[in-house]
Image (cartoon, coloured by chain):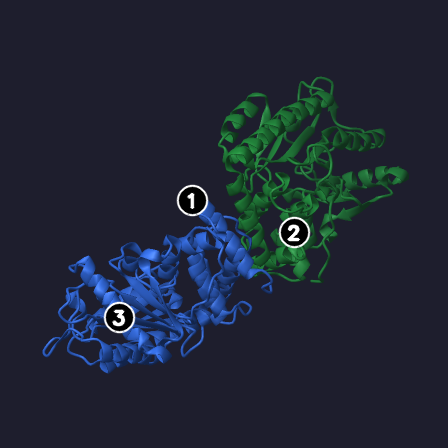
Chain colours: A green, B blue
Amino acid sequence: MPEKTFIVSHWMEGTGPYAEVAVSSRVRLARNIRDIPFPYLASNTQTNKVREMICSGAAEQENKFDDLHFLKMEEAENIDRHVLVEKHLISPLLAKESHNSGVFLRKDEAVSIMVNEEDHLRIQSIFPGLQLEKAWEEVDSFDNLFENKLDYAFHERYGYLTACPTNVGTGLRASVMLHVPALIKTKQFNRILGALSQVGVAVRGLYGEGTDIIGNMVQISNQITLGQSEKEIIRNLFSVTRQVIEQENAARQSLLNENREVIADQSWRALGVLKYAHLLSSQEAIQLLSDIRLGFELGLVPRIERRLLNQMLVLIRPACLQMLAGKDLDARERDQERARQIRESLKGLAS
Amino acid sequence: MPEKTFIVSHWMEGTGPYAEVAVSSRVRLARNIRDIPFPYLASNTQTNKVREMICSGAAEQENKFDDLHFLKMEEAENIDRHVLVEKHLISPLLAKESHNSGVFLRKDEAVSIMVNEEDHLRIQSIFPGLQLEKAWEEVDSFDNLFENKLDYAFHERYGYLTACPTNVGTGLRASVMLHVPALIKTKQFNRILGALSQVGVAVRGLYGEGTDIIGNMVQISNQITLGQSEKEIIRNLFSVTRQVIEQENAARQSLLNENREVIADQSWRALGVLKYAHLLSSQEAIQLLSDIRLGFELGLVPRIERRLLNQMLVLIRPACLQMLAGKDLDARERDQERARQIRESLKGLAS
């Protein structure tokens, strides 16, 4: 396995509005081609045909697809597939099984279009900060191109048809990754969790559905895809997210007023441990990165690029570590490599 | 309160035989003047007379006392008395109450002679490493000088008489401060504790009688003062100590063989936390210093002078911190000052 370098995805830049809390914003659309079964029910011939239709549709849109390349999943190395999952560019499902599956990846990694995942087409865009509108526009523009070339499965009453009924309608899922250490530290997050579910917003952990909240990172997303327009969904989630961000910022201010020294100490220690540890579990590293992030956002520790923090959050994951090391690693070796990569990343950082 | 600098005592040098485990060796003799009550029972006039007799005895021995100065306890500032306690140069009792008490301190702080503590005279010497013999010789030479000038309370059958019956006989207490992290980590220390008490050796914590074992530091000392000659007491304690040191070194080797990476990681992390923390409790600091010390002795972390480690063990204590800061500090301020002093001490240390 050759050593490879880590490519920074656009969403990791740490830019965009509200980047002090909002790490990234993601929008994806699920689409299927009329009269062909969903990938799970389709024959090999049918999924192959789907892939060909989509690829030739894309080929006819040269300009728009100039910056994208298509990767057939069955031709991709196992490690590369899992690195894409860890960068949130493809789903774990796509990495695991290929039914003539594939993905278009844009160079900046802000756009990825999965073929033959759960649906024939899943168009996804991720932007740094709170930029749902922008991510939506990207996704929408690709959707329009495909819609010109393909006959989408669409029902007058239900809207776009999808493999899973929870996606029927707009086929749209929008989500925002938020860093909410102050809401969690001040025990306000549970209250907010209840409020979010009442307005149709789901909360998930760092790694998506079914994962725990670690490192004070939460993904919030729309639960409803039916009965609202795409713009309404985006606008609603944006407005809910802004409120959560405001509450997080207020909670940070009260932490700062009441507990400045303890919060600063926690951030400095996190920096010390990450700069010096030789064995680091993923969970501990994520928690320490959160402590540093909070300290940096509150001006308590020296400038650490958000980009570096986001990058570290990804490169400490198993596939990235193995890609960087250029070999398979067992659990202990990963803890060593994780510590090594973090020490390298933080080298030269002012103390 | 003026800021003062910290004077390094000879025992902190980190030199001497077996310094990888033995931090320091201490010997003290208790002596009283015949026909004058012990300080606690004596009148003000009597303790005053004792002090004068001892001081004039010393004055007649100019050469030997050239490097010593005498400090009357009632004239010493509170902070300075407590700094002497923290450096193990005088007892907490002497710092607390003065019955016309005082102390002779040698410039290198390897010899301190307390006047009107529990006994009229307590001659003490501390050397770095395992150097009981050397400490004994120092103490003995001062004892001989005083014996020429003063009429000691001595009983043909019981030997030297002392305020506390546990000191009667030789009046000698010898002790060694040992760093035994491997025996404690491998849970062998409890077994050794039992064996030590059977051979008449007492075990105490870092700060002496009644204190817990913290930072893997233990003081072992002779329990018996009667029925053995001074040389026998010293020789016995030396030989027991050497065995403990051998066992500690064996335990370190097995840790190294079985758990090298974990021990190294622990030492590196300790270094990271001490270099970066902004709030440090005394207990945590002592534990982290122990982790670094073990890592350094096993060659797992870069060279850190033992002298620096010993010095930090003392300067993180409350009176030293307040002396260094030049002002009274509450608990939170001490935690800050402790972290600051340690960061300063470790500045520039290779990472």
- The reply to whether residue A35 is visible in this rendering is no
Q: Which picture quadrant has residue A14?
A: top right
Q: Which mark is residue A183?
A: none
Task: In the rendered view, tell whether residue B232 sits above or below residue B176.
Answer: below
Q: Position of residue A303 (x, y in %)?
A: 67, 46
Q: Which picture quadrant has residue A12?
A: top right
Label 1, label 2: how many angstroms apart (C-alpha)? 43 Å
Quarter of the picture containing the N terminus of chain A is bottom right
Mark in the foreground, 1 or 3: 3
Residue located 66% across and 53% down the image = A350
Residue projecting furthest to the left: B157
Tell me the chain of label 2: A
Mark in the foreground, 1 or 2: 1
Q: Local crowd at mark 3 within 10 Å, few (<14), some, or many (≥20)?
A: some
Residue placed most toward the observer, B30 or A70: B30
Label 1, label 3: how many angstroms apart (C-alpha)? 39 Å
Mark in the foreground, 3 or 2: 3
Q: State whether discs 1 and 2 lie on one chain.
A: no
Q: What secondary structure is marked by label 3?
A: helix
Tell me the chain of label 1: B
Q: Which picture quadrant has residue B31?
A: bottom left
Left or right, B16 with reference to A212: left
The amino acid type found where label 2 is placed reads: Leu
The amino acid type found where label 1 is placed reads: Asp
Pointer 2: what residue? A315
Residue placed most toward the observer, B240 or A241: B240
- The reply to whether residue B56 is visible in this rendering is yes
Pointer 1: what residue? B330
Tell me the chain of label 3: B
Q: Which mark is residue B54?
A: 3
